[in-house]
C-alpha cells in the first residue's frame, strides 16, 4: 500500500485527512508534538494495525533538522502532506510564533525529503487563501494565479502576520522546487475559512481550532446580542479540504499546481439562520433573525474550476456543514 507522512496530525484539518487517507487505503504516519497527542489519534481509530496508522514526534517544525528522522521510514514514504503551521491570533512575537514555523517548517521538510526520503514522489503543502488575497486591491475574480503582495515589513504587523506566514511559506516551497530540482513535485491546497465537524479528541471547547470558534460561540449563546461582522467571506467544508489533499496525491496532473478550494461566500447571518433551521432548540441562544450584522459586500468573485475539474471536488453546501458542525459541538457538551 502507498505510504503517507502527514504533518500536524493533531490539527483540525489533519484529523479529517487521516480519515480519508485510511478510507482510500493509504498507510499513514502522522507527526505530532507529544506522545499524548499521538495516543489520542490512535485511540480514535481503534483496532487498526500499526502499519495502517502510527505517529512520530516532531516537537517544533521550526527547529533545524526537525524532520530529518521523521521522513525516514521502513517501508519508505511515497507521499508527504504538510499541514503543520500555526493558525491562531495570539501573536506575541511575529517571527518566532508564525513566520519561523511556517517558513522553516516548509523548507525544512522539503530539505529533509530531498536528503533522506528519495522515494517520495509528491508533497502536498497546506497553503491558504491568505497566500492569494490582496485586501488592498481585490481583483475582479480570485483564482490560483493571484498572490498576496505582502512584504516582510508588513508581515511584522500583528494583524497581518498569519496571512504573511502562509504567503512566504508557500513561496518558499515553489522556490525550493525550482532551485533544488528534487525528485518529487509539489501541489498546494489554498482554502479560505474552513468550517466543519470538530475532531473527536478535542481537549476542551476552549481549545477549538480558530476557524470553528464562531460555531462554538453561536451554540453557547455568546453572539446572542450581536452577530459579529463577517470579515472573511469565503469558506469551504473541512471534508472537501481533506479530500482535496488526498486527491492531490492520487491525481497525476495535480503536480505543480495550486488549488483554490472554496464553496463561495457566506455571512455570519447565514450561519445563524442555518443553525436555526437544523437545530431549532438552539433558537434562544441565537441572535434574532435579520439581526444587524455588516452584510458582506462581495467586492470580488472566485473561480474554483481547477479544484472541481482536476481534483473532482463537488462542494458540500453550507447548511450541511453548519448542521454537522453544531452536532459535533453538542456531542462534546457545548
Ligand atoms: P490547527 O491549529 O487545528 O492545526 C495546526 C497544526 O499544526 C496542529 O497539529 C499543531 O500542533 C501544528 N503546529 C503548529 N505549530 C507547530 C510547530 N511549531 N511545530 C509542530 N507543529 C506545529 O489548524 P488547522 O487544522 O485549521 O490548520 C492546518 C493548516 O491549514 C495550517 O497550515 C493552516 O494555516 C491551514 N489553513 C487553515 C484554515 C482554516 O480555516 N482552518 C484556512 C486556510 C489554511 P499542536 O496542536 O500540537 O499545536
Image (cartoon, rainbow, N blue to C red):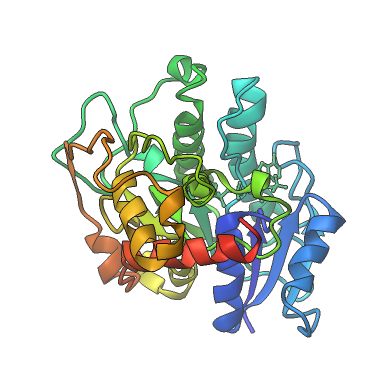
Q: Position of residue 4 (x, y in %)?
A: 64, 69
Does 234 sit left or right of 7 as displayed? left
The quadrant holding residue 39 is bottom right
Q: Residue at the spot x=86%, y=57% of the render?
A: 35
Report the residue that reaches farthest toward the top.
Answer: 153
Instruction: Using the image, determine if residue 54 lies above or below residue 234.
Output: below
Quadrant location of the N terminus in the rendered image: bottom right
Residue found at the far right of this picture: 35
Q: Is 86 located above or below residue 237 in the figure?
A: above
x and y percentages locating residue 59 in the rendered image: 79, 45
Marks counted in the figure total 0
315 or 226, which is in the foreground? Answer: 226
Q: Residue at x 55, y 58 (%)?
A: 13
Question: Can the viewer see residue 177 in this picture?
Answer: no
Residue pictured at 65% horizontal, 28% vertical: 97
State which quarter of the image contains the C terminus.
bottom right
Q: What is the residue that sits farthest to the front in this orientation? A: 284
The answer to which image quadrant residue 332 occupies is bottom right
| Left or right, residue 83 beside residue 67 | left
Q: Residue at x 50, y 38 (%)?
A: 172
Residue 315 visible somewhere in the drawing:
yes
Q: Position of residue 32 (x, y in %)?
A: 75, 54
- Viewer-nearest residue: 266 or 85: 266
- Which of the pair 39/167 is nearer the observer? 39
Amino acid at each position: 500500500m502507498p505510504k503517507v507522512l502527514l504533518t500536524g496530525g493533531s490539527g483540525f484539518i489533519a484529523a479529517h485527512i487521516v480519515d480519508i487517507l485510511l478510507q482510500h487505503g493509504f498507510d499513514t504516519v502522522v507527526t505530532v508534538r507529544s506522545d499524548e497527542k499521538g495516543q489520542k489519534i490512535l485511540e480514535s481509530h481503534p483496532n487498526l494495525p500499526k502499519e495502517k496508522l502510527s505517529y512520530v514526534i516532531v516537537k517544533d517544525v521550526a527547529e533545524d533538522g526537525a524532520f530529518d528522522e521523521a521522513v525516514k521510514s521502513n517501508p519508505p514514504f511515497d507521499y508527504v502532506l504538510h499541514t503543520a503551521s500555526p493558525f491562531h491570533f495570539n501573536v506575541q512575537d511575529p517571527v518566532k510564533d508564525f513566520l519561523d514555523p511556517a517558513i522553516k517548517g516548509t523548507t525544512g521538510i522539503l530539505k529533509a525529503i530531498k536528503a533522506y526520503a528519495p522515494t517520495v514522489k509528491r508533497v502536498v503543502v497546506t497553503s491558504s487563501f491568505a497566500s492569494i488575497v490582496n485586501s488592498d486591491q481585490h481583483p475582479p475574480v480570485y483564482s490560483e494565479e493571484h498572490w498576496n503582495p505582502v512584504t516582510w515589513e508588513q508581515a511584522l504587523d500583528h494583524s497581518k502576520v498569519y496571512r504573511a506566514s502562509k504567503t512566504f511559506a508557500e513561496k518558499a516551497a515553489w522556490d525550493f522546487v525550482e532551485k533544488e530540482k528534487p525528485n518529487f513535485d509539489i501541489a498546494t491546497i489554498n482554502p479560505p475559512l474552513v468550517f466543519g465537524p470538530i475532531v473527536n479528541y478535542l481537549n476542551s471547547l476552549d481549545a477549538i481550532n480558530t476557524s470553528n470558534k464562531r460555531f462554538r460561540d453561536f451554540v453557547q449563546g455568546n453572539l446572542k446580542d450581536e452577530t459579529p461582522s463577517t470579515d472573511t467571506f469565503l469558506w469551504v467544508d473541512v471534508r472537501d479540504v481533506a479530500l482535496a489533499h488526498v486527491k492531490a496525491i492520487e491525481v497525476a496532473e495535480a503536480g505543480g499546481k495550486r488549488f483554490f478550494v472554496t464553496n463561495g461566500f457566506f455571512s455570519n447571518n447565514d450561519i445563524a439562520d442555518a443553525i436555526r433551521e437544523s437545530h431549532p432548540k438552539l433558537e434562544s441562544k441565537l441572535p434574532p433573525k435579520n439581526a444587524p450584522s455588516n452584510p458582506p459586500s462581495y467586492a470580488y468573485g472566485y473561480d474554483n474550476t481547477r479544484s472541481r475539474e482536476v481534483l473532482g471536488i463537488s462542494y458540500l453546501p453550507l447548511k450541511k456543514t453548519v448542521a454537522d458542525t453544531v452536532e459535533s459541538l453538542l456531542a462534546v457538551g457545548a
